[in-house]
């Protein structure tokens, strides 16, 4: 993609790099820029983020665009802390970036046949409200069919017994990544876009990272390296002959964009065939449908929506709608990946969404690798990593990314990154 705009991280090419940094972060997704922002908020300036494209261009801009606790995770008690953390972060992000993170009402229908029974939905929504600890965007209520159809006129009312309404957060994920990246650079961090990390090695003066910028290569060193490459994390390990601490897997999520279907609320739907939750959402003047959940074993650069995934979403969606969508209604498709630590005792759908941080140690020099993590809770994960790095260095400073003064002011995305053309660009 040709990009003549100046990005939030400075120019897309030609970033001047020092020979040594205290921390090098590989990957300019939400976790990479989030950790940089966290360290910068502690007063650390000698931090470098390396991104092979532009920040936010990978998985972080191909999410379901939600800032939420994860209502569906309440099916697994082990994930209750994850939900509570997400709800806390949802409340905080809506105050730190209110132009990007906004409240969105959702309709959760009760099916006549199949799906969760009403009492289970009621318990789940009550628990969701309770876990928000007074930071709810609005408590759940029961809607009549007429009330529900005012907010979602495309619902096929013959399929449902009734409807619950609850509230969650929605975002522009790319805009959020770029806001966090800009906040980090304003505090002194360097972000090098169009720069690929080829390999990592270690010697007496720390970690050596070989970088390629166009036709040029450069070695930079650091005491600490964070592998926040997500789906590409083990690719650099393989090139560097570094053995990962755990096995990873990619969970592919495919999304469809269709015309505006007149929704003022999002739809929280459960497929009666396989029990999977999916969403139909108003977003940026379009309707967003997603997501699938499939194990992806190909190269991350080749991850695109597959015909069977598109058909799956259309078929499941049409079970609930009074209008019937076809392939011709699709304006854009996009697919992202969630990089998870594989649980050898669980299938893909039951693998926990809590994150995992592994560490390779060479004396006091540390190499961290991130598995899992959610867009919503990125700041909490970044705080955990930032604290681990600071404590290893003997620095007792505290993260301040929860303070508005540490955040860049609102800005506007470049024209070529506006919706929907961004999905043809990145």
Image (tube, rainbow, N blue to C red):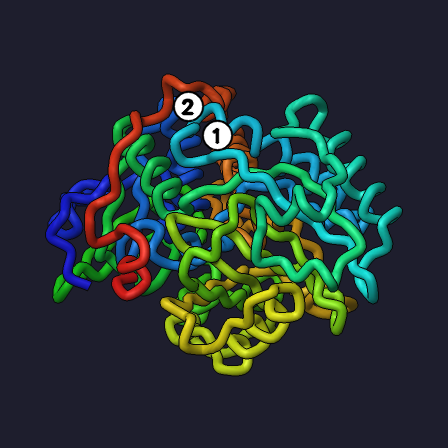
Q: Are marks 1 and 2 in contact (CB under 8 Å)?
A: yes
Q: Residue furthest right?
A: 119
Looking at the image, which residue is at 30% across and 47% down? 221
Q: Is residue 284 visible?
A: yes
Quarter of the rendering containing residue 90? top right
Q: Which mark is residue 340?
A: none
What residue is shown with label 2?
A: 42
Separation of marks 1 and 2 at Cα, in angstroms? 9 Å
Mark 1 or mark 2, which is nearer to you?
2
- Which secondary structure, mark 2? loop
What residue is shown with label 1?
A: 390
Vertical placement of residue 243 versus 66, above or below? below
Task: Classify the position of the N terminus by image quarter.
Answer: bottom left
Say which of 183 and 232 sits in front: 183
For residue 353, side relative to residue 330 (left or right): right
Q: Residue furthest front?
A: 146
């Amino acid at each position: 993609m040709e990009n003549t705009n100046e990005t939030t991280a400075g120019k897309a090419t030609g970033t001047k790099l020092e020979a040594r940094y205290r921390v090098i972060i590989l990957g300019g997704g939400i976790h990479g820029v989030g950790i940089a922002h966290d360290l910068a908020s502690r007063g650390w300036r000698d931090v470098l983020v390396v991104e092979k494209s532009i920040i936010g261009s990978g998985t972080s801009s191909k999410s379901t665009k939600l800032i939420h606790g994860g209502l569906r995770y309440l099916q697994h008690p082990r994930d209750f802390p994850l939900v509570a953390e997400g709800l806390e972060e949802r409340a905080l992000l809506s105050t730190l970036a209110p132009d990007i993170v906004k409240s969105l009402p959702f309709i959760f229908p009760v099916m006549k046949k199949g799906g969760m029974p009403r009492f289970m939905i009621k318990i789940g929504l009550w628990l969701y409200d309770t876990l928000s600890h007074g930071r709810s965007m609005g408590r759940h209520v029961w809607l009549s069919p007429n009330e529900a159809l005012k907010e979602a006129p495309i619902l096929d009312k013959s399929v449902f017994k009734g409807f619950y309404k609850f509230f969650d957060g929605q975002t522009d994920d790319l805009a959020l990544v770029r806001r966090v990246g800009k906040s980090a650079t304003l505090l002194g961090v360097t972000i090098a876009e169009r720069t690929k990390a080829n390999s990592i090695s270690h010697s007496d003066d720390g970690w050596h990272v070989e970088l390629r910028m166009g036709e040029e290569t450069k070695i930079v060193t650091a005491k600490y390296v964070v592998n926040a490459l997500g789906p590409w994390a083990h690719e650099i390990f393989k090139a560097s002959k570094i053995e990962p601490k755990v096995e990873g897997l990619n969970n592919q999520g495919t999304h469809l964009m269709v015309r505006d279907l007149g929704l003022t609320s999002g739809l929280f739907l459960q497929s009666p065939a396989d029990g999977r939750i999916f969403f139909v959402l108003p977003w940026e003047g379009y309707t967003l449908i997603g997501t699938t959940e499939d194990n992806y074993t190909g190269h991350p650069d080749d991850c695109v929506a597959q015909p069977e995934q598109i058909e799956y979403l259309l078929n499941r969606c049409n079970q609930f709608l009074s209008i019937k969508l076809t392939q011709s209604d699709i304006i854009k498709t996009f697919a992202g990946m969630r990089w998870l630590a594989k649980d050898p005792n669980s299938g893909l759908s039951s693998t926990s969404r809590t994150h995992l941080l592994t560490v390779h140690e060479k004396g006091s020099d540390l190499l961290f690798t991130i598995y899992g993590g959610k867009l919503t809770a990125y700041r909490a994960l970044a705080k955990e990593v930032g604290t681990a790095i600071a404590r290893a260095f003997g620095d007792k400073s505290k993260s301040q990314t929860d303070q508005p003064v540490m955040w860049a002011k609102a800005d506007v995305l470049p024209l070529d990154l506006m919706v929907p053309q961004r999905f043809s660009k990145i």
